[in-house]
């Protein structure tokens, strides 16, 4: 039996060469009998369920094949390597590197051997209505591959290597020592209005001048580069790739370029720099998915100084989790602390960097499956999505405690860093959209003047649909922008919804659709429109038109006053542009 929705999604995702993990199972995946073909219609393989980590770097890591056991079907070395690649790419995001379970069920051999080969084959082929994609009937995996994966699961999991100080130091390179760097800005660039733009599939960032809209420099970074963050002074740019390589770029150089690099693990997603008064530009931190750890580095050289494992107990049931990944990290302005979110165990760790030898960590029990988030407009409260729990945790970085845990009223919140504005009726709010449905949730953020509304969903808006990743506004803007790049409908994926903030007091606020993909003039590909980012002045917003690696992509600049097209940035070097990080807004947490 075919599942057209899944097939469309799979095709769309493949076209755009997204490496979102294609997951085997979701939180509620059950081990009951394989579903009947008629149940397959109930599969909810929405973008929300597909947006799970794909361990694209670990899949290529050479790991030793565990020994076989009599009576258990074995794999040849070649089969093991192929199965391992498929597992890390498609399954580990949910079931964990060590197969001990994350949002998906544990697939340890005590579980899998009890079920047996045939059962596993059926389950992989048909999936389950609870969220496990139907890999066989969708055509994603062949019969032979399914048999190979079932045998792989009956054998002990492969254990990727650890990555400690020895490996980190061996990878550390200072290309230009501090004393050979400029002592003042050597270029005419308006650094604060540069956009560090992720070129996802070439492993580079393009620095684009906010005024001329020209590429100033393209810099090699890590594999499948993910995000950029800026040092407190605005001089240094930090970029992290999924291969856990952190690259430090000096924006004062005549042509900004790399001055140092280090690897902090095998798979990573987040990086941040110290921002507390007196510690500006002093330290950087990066968080890894594998091994589960964070690394504090020197801010000017990336010398790795301290590695801290995040392995430990889940916050609620207090059971050991062997691989809780580090998700978002932000820098507190109230204390010399990094705010580190630990995904699978649901802890937020306030890591005090004032004394690295006698490291103090205040551990806040929040919620499992923490992912992305940002500050409220005052910079005191950090709001982070626990996406598989449909919640947002609010961390008070002044008092170092959990201020609230909020049901967002949508499915799988994904705020990016969120958006802050003054609502005409409810005052200051912070916003998240959702991967799993069209809900846009507005959360009150003023516990002093509006305590009755603080940390409550004060309003929900209906956007274009699910598959939203990022919302954005600016203190000078009158609008809230909501993207939907992972929506299965190509028209929705290539446009954004814009709400007029002044109209939000109306009963059913309407939105305007900006056909960004069409405005780009590109006619090929799905033209996914992703992540709005304002310029320094807050009068224009930039969107990436994210196509496949061999297709044309672009950046579309919209005039925030008129909501009209201002410019299209096209350049053959703009390959798979996704996130864009304006230096001024990023370093000052303006969103
Ligand atoms: Fe991201 C932020 C993890 C896929 C673009 N992404 C984040 C953060 C995390 C994360 C933990 C928060 C970092 C922080 O603030 O410190 N992302 C993951 C994944 O695990 C996931 C789902 C799958 C994977 O295997 O990596 C994933 N992310 C993507 C993409 O496919 C995106 C859309 C395109 C790309 O370039 O990779 C993407 N993620 C982004 C962007 C941000 C981000 C642009 C930062 C947004 C911001 O405004 O700060």
Image: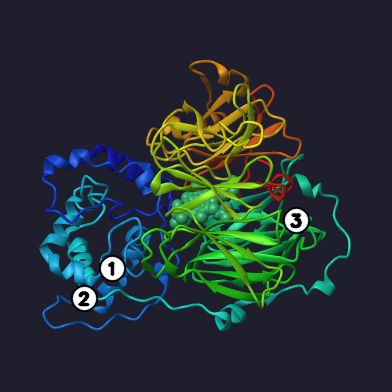
Q: Residues within 10 Å of mark 1 (few under 14, many from 20)?
A: many
Choose mark 1 or mark 3, whichever is in front: 3
Q: Is residue 336 above or below residue 590?
A: below
Q: Residues within 10 Å of mark 3 (few under 14, many from 20)?
A: many
Residue 533 in percent (x, y) is at 63, 40
Q: Which mark is residue 533?
A: none
In front: 61, or 292?
Answer: 292
Q: Quadrant of residue 251?
A: bottom right
Dot 2 and dot 1 residues touching (CB under 8 Å): yes
The residue under label 2 is 75
Q: Quadrant of residue 156?
A: bottom left
Q: Assess mark 3: CB under 8 A from ligand 1?
A: no
Q: Which mark is residue 232?
A: 3
Residue 257 in percent (x, y) is at 73, 62
The residue under label 1 is 83
Residue 572 in percent (x, y) is at 60, 47
In front: 232, or 202?
Answer: 232
Q: Residue at x 25, y 38 (%)?
A: 4
Numbered disc 1: secondary structure: helix
Q: Earlier in the sequence, mark 2 or mark 1?
A: 2
Q: Residue at x 75, y 56 (%)?
A: 232
Q: Alpha-carbon distance for marks 2 and 3?
A: 52 Å
Numbered disc 3: secondary structure: loop
């Amino acid at each position: 039996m075919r599942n057209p929705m899944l097939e469309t999604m799979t095709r769309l995702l493949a076209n755009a060469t997204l490496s979102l993990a294609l997951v085997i199972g979701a939180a509620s995946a059950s081990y009951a009998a394989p579903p009947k073909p008629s149940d397959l219609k109930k599969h909810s393989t929405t973008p929300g369920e597909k947006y799970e980590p794909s361990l694209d770097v670990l899949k290529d890591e050479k790991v030793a094949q565990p020994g076989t056991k009599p009576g258990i079907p074995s794999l040849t070395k070649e089969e093991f390597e192929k199965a391992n690649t498929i597992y890390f790419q498609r399954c580990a995001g949910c079931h964990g590197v060590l197969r001990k379970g994350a949002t998906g069920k544990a697939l340890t051999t005590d579980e899998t051997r009890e079920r047996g080969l045939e059962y596993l084959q059926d389950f992989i082929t048909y999936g389950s209505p609870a969220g496990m994609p139907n890999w066989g009937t969708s055509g994603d995996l062949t019969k032979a591959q399914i048999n190979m994966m079932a045998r792989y699961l009956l054998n002990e999991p492969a254990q990727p290597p650890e990555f400690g100080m020895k490996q980190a130091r061996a990878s550390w390179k200072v290309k230009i020592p501090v004393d050979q760097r400029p002592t003042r800005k050597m270029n005419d660039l308006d650094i604060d209005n540069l956009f560090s733009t992720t070129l996802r599939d070439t492993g580079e960032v393009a620095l684009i001048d906010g005024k001329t809209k020209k590429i100033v420099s393209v810099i090699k970074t890590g594999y499948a580069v993910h995000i950029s963050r800026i040092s407190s002074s605005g001089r240094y740019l930090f970029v992290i790739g999924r291969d856990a390589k952190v690259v430090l770029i000096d924006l004062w150089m005549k042509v900004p370029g790399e001055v140092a690099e280090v690897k902090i693990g095998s798979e990573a997603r987040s990086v941040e720099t110290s921002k507390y008064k007196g510690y500006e530009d002093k330290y950087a931190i990066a968080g890894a998915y594998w091994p589960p750890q964070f690394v504090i580095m020197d801010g000017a050289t990336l010398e790795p100084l301290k590695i801290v494992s995040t392995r430990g107990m889940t916050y609620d049931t207090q059971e050991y989790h062997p691989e809780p990944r580090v998700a978002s990290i932000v820098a507190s302005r109230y204390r010399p602390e990094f705010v580190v979110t630990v995904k699978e165990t649901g802890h937020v760790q306030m890591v005090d960097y004032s004394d690295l030898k006698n490291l103090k960590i205040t551990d806040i029990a929040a919620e499992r499956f923490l992912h992305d988030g940002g500050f409220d407009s005052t910079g005191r409260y950090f709001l982070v999505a626990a996406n598989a729990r449909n919640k947002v945790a609010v961390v008070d970085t002044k008092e170092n405690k959990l201020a609230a845990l909020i049901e967002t009223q949508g499915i799988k919140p994904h705020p990016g860093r969120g958006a802050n504005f003054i609502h005409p009726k409810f005052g200051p709010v912070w916003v998240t959209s959702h991967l799993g449905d069209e809900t846009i949730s507005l959360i009150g953020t003023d516990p002093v003047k509006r305590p009755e509304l603080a940390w409550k969903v004060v309003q929900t808006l209906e956007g274009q649909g699910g598959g939203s990743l990022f919302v954005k506004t600016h203190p000078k803007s009158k609008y809230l922008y909501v993207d939907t790049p992972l929506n299965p409908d190509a028209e929705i994926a290539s446009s954004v919804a814009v709400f007029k903030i002044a109209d939000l007091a109306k009963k059913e606020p309407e939105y305007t659709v900006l056909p960004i993909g069409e405005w780009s003039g590109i006619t090929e590909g799905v033209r996914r429109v992703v992540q709005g980012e304002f310029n320094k002045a807050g009068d224009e917003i930039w969107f990436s038109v994210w196509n496949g690696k061999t297709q044309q992509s672009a950046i579309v600049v919209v005039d925030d006053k008129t909501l009209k097209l201002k410019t299209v940035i096209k350049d053959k070097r703009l390959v798979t542009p996704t996130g864009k990080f304006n230096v001024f807004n990023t370093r000052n947490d303006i969103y």
